Amino acid sequence: MWTVTTITQERIRKLVGDESPGFAFAACCSALTPIHRFRQRELVLVARSVTAADCADVLVVAITPRLEDGRVDLEGTRNNVRFLVDRGAKFLMPMCGTGLVYDATLEEFEQVTAAFVEAASDQALVVPGIGPGYGRSLEMADLARSLGVAGAMIMPIVGPASAAGVKDGLTRIADVCGLPIILYQRRLDIMPVEHVIELCRHEAVVGLKYAVDDLQAFTRIAAAAGSEAAMVCGMAEDPCLDYLRAGAVGFSSGMANFVPRMSLSILEAYQKGNEEEAERLRVMMVPFEDFRGEDSARYSGSALHAAMEDVGLAGGPVIPFVEDVSAEDRLRVRTLLEPLVSEEGRLQQVST
């Protein structure tokens, strides 16, 4: 399955930031997509689309690194992507909740998504979040599609909504956005089980990221729609094994930003039937996840930014309406990181 879009030379120049007369258009094109052809001053992108089978993986929900003045750190973004690809990550999700898409501008969304596509090249699928909101989802889908992404995930609804309205809105987005879609379920009141099962049967929907603490509801959805769309645990490592046993084929992870081999090894061990090893790694990761969830998850995103910096990757400050990890709590981050970084290094050595 492939997606065909057209992007102008001037637009690529703007995104990459190269204003020199000898702008390397062909080099940029080859970085953006594995298959392309030229038509006058345009690039026709032919990008591989994400499928349900691709979701049997760790979906890395990526942070958005920033500079001290609040601007997006695009070079840091590219370096982070290269780190993930080098460690075996194949499914990258920029500008989702972990990337604080809720408070990013459309320009930042476009810049960050372009940086991911460029740095990942043909080595990983890039599936950004779109939304929240109906109109914003459509605008972001247009931008993402023009950059040659593999698909998109519709972010959870945060404004006024009803079950009937959400079903209609998600169907409309899937109908017109021109990309394979991953649904994101965080509320059963406006996305009841029966509606989600029906939505998963939409021809554009390839997966469901399920993030409701209700295993019974998930089991019902997986039983009825698991053959139509990939079921993904959307609550990171802590409950992932329970959901894998109940029909999930993969899980999303924020910690995979800085210890990707650990997250990938949990899934690999489970898939090979070695649940003891999967559980050992999961238990190691839970304390950091618990830290992220303290005090109404005040550090859910910024703890990842702090960890990224501490391991030598790009993190930087977060933007409103969340807060950076305090100086006092940064000491806790470093303490929590020590065993994780050690295990990540060991796993990386084993895999090479």
Image (cartoon, grey):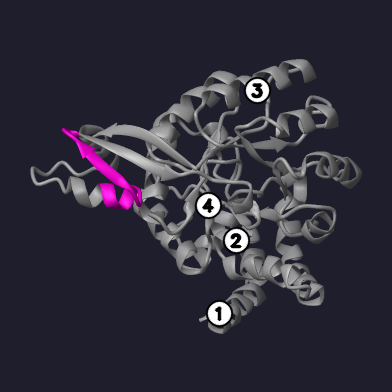
Residue for point 52% across, 40% down: 151
Up-down relation of residue 274 to residue 251 (above or below): below
**Residue 181 among those drawn in magenta:** no
Residue where numbered disc 4 is placed: 92
- Which of pointers 3 and 4 lies earlier in the amino acid sequence? 4
Q: Can the viewer see residue 161 in this picture?
A: yes
- Which of pointers 1 and 2 lies earlier in the amino acid sequence? 2
Numbered circle sitting on residue 351:
1
Q: Is residue 130 left or right of residue 264?
A: left
Q: Can the viewer see residue 326 in this picture?
A: no
Q: Quadrant of residue 327?
A: bottom right
Q: Which amino acid does label 3 sit on?
A: Thr
From mark 1 to mark 2, how far is it between C-alphas? 16 Å
- Which of pointers 4 and 2 lies earlier in the amino acid sequence? 4
Residue where numbered disc 2 is placed: 256
Residue mark closest to the camera, 1 vs 2 = 1
- Do the numbered discs 1 and 4 sit on residues whose CB atoms are within 8 Å? no
Residue where numbered disc 3 is placed: 171
Q: Which amino acid does label 4 sit on?
A: Leu
Task: Look at the numbered disc 3 and give the secondary structure of its residue.
Answer: helix
Q: Give the range drawn in magenta.
A: 29-41
Residue mark closest to the camera, 3 vs 2 = 3
From mark 3 to mark 2, how far is it between C-alphas? 31 Å
